[in-house]
Amino acid sequence: MTYTRENIRYCLLAWDPYEAEETNTFGTEPLPISGLFNWAQALDGKREMPRSKEEFDAFNIVHINITARNLFLIPTVLSKIDKSKTRILANVDFSVELWHQNFHYPDSFIEYLDKCDYVFAVEPEMAFILSCALKRPIPVIPHPSDIEGIKAHHSEQRLQQIGVAGHRYDPNLLVPHLMLRDLPPGWQTVLSGMLADVSPFYHLFTFAKPNSKFEDYIKFVAQLYAVLETHTFHTYGRHVVECAALGVPVVGPSKIAAMKTCFPCTTADSFEEQRKFMLALINYPDFYMAVADYGMKHAEEYSLRSSANKMLAFLNGGAAA
């Protein structure tokens, strides 16, 4: 069949009832968190855990985000669905550099994943590795963001603060501290991002922003002057996309795929180049505005509509891009 926005019946599998309840509140929450869960909104679907064959029959696309803990879902779902009516869509969680910590039985991992009808990756290096393992082309389709909702919080007021993005699985924060410790007078560094506990890093920055509700976090980021990304692993870069939508320039490495899409002029792998770009953003307003405007324009590539179009093209056998 040809999938369209009108006839696709999409389900993002949730094997945690709390997560399912949270995800199905799209429209009641002011702004949904970016990333994986946005597929339910982009494709007008649901996130839940069907139990019976009859419940699975309500969907023609069942999406599994593969982790180390839920690989068993693939054979479980296969035993429940009618393959003539329902197809399995899968992506693999985590950066590829972290797979060795999560998938200890690669033969089983590949065998189960290959049983899925559709497999996609969120960034190019992951797509390449999966294509080697599965011996079939793997498209790159980043998870979507509510770009329109994020842009609604764009702020013309910018503080003299450089955000440093901290990440749960990759807390590379000493190097950014050393790189930015002698900024021009009056400038501050702010630790932000997805860190369960920021207290071990308080002493490295002017202050640290604890985790908060997503919309409150977006309002906070909207007033930053620029952001330094710290990822050392390959990732698609959800936080970069959010900054781009807000018009907040980001300096970061090429391992973050969204850097090359939204901020090619400030993408650098060497710490020396990253510092030069950050100082250029501070010292040259025209360069700053050009980088910010480019990011806001290209953030649209991650919007709900753009992502849905890419996914439907892939499901229909065409190019995802």
Image (cartoon, rainbow, N blue to C red):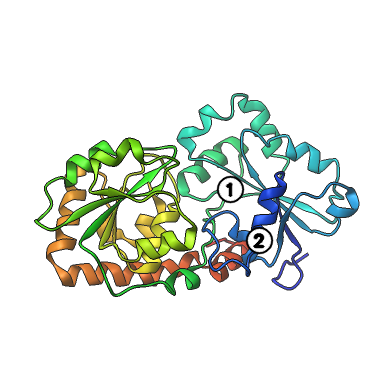
Q: Residue at x 67, y 39 (%)?
A: 113
Q: Quadrant of residue 57?
A: bottom right
Count of numbered circles on the image = 2
Residues at badges 1 and 2 in contact (C-beta under 8 Å)?
A: no
Give the position of the N terminus as an image quadrant: bottom right
The residue indicated by pointer 2 is 40
Q: Residue at x 41, y 52 (%)?
A: 257
- Mark 1 or mark 2: whose residue is earlier in sequence: 2
Using the image as rendered, state which of residue 190 and residue 107 is in the foreground.
190
The reply to whether residue 89 is in sight is no
Cα–Cα gap, marks 1 and 2: 25 Å
Q: Quadrant of residue 195?
A: top left
Check disc 1 and give the amino acid type: Pro
Q: Residue at x 52, y 56 (%)?
A: 142
SS at badge 1: loop
Residue 147: x, y in percent? 48, 69
Residue 21: x, y in percent? 70, 55
Q: Is residue 17 left or right of residue 208?
A: right
The residue indicated by pointer 1 is 137
Using the image as rendered, state which of residue 208 and residue 221 is in the foreground.
208
Using the image as rendered, state which of residue 218 and residue 125 is in the foreground.
218
Mark 1 or 2, closer to the camera: 2
Q: Estimate how packed mark 1 is, as few (under 14), some (14 to 19) or many (20 or more) residues with alpha carbons within 10 Å.
A: few
